[in-house]
Image: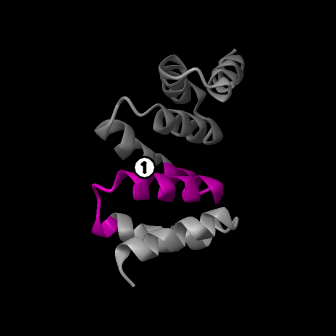
Amino acid sequence: MNMFDEYRRGLLFMRMGEPASAARILAPIVSAEPANAEARLQLALAYFATAQLNRARDELSVLVERDPSDHYSHHVLGRTLERLGRPAEALPHLRLAAAMSPVPEYRDAVDRVSRQRG
């Protein structure tokens, strides 16, 4: 199978609610094609869904470093840091995402994490 077919297979596993299987398929793709931002995002989401939060954080950090204007990656990185119990680190990413795009979920995350910080 070629990389594109494997990528599609990984997405299928994500849609089927099997993120652990998706991660096993997507990780070699990201290793082989490190510049493939979409594959990296899907891998990060698979890691997030399986509570492999440090791995998700690592993948998302690469994405926001490469494209600081990617509001969704900032949001998911913020959510990942929130789940890791690091609200002070999460809040700047969540605020940036909310400032870049008027998605209600983004604003809700900012409000929630702001309350956590007291």
Query: Mark 1, residues whose alpha carbon is within 10 Å: few (<14), some, or many (≥20)?
Result: few
Q: In x, y percent, where is residue 89? A: 51, 28
Instruction: Tally the marks.
Output: 1
Left or right? Give the position of 54 relative to 35. right
SS category of the residue bearing label 1: helix
Looking at the rendered structure, the kind of residue marked 1 is Asp
Q: Magenta includes 48?
A: yes
Residue at 71% across, 23% down: 112
Residue 101 within the magenta-colored segment of the rendering: no
**What residue do we see at 29% from left, 69% from top?**
32
The residue wearing badge 1 is 58
Q: Is residue 1 above or below residue 33?
A: below
Name above or below for residue 7 compared with residue 60.
Answer: below
- Magenta-drawn segment: 31-56
Q: Residue at x 59, y 69 (%)?
A: 12
Q: Quadrant of residue 107?
A: top right
Residue 105 location, x and y as percent? 67, 29
Whole-percent x, y for residue 30 in the image: 36, 63
Indicate the position of residue 117 as horizontal and vertical percent values. 65, 19
Overall secondary structure of the magenta stretch?
Answer: helix
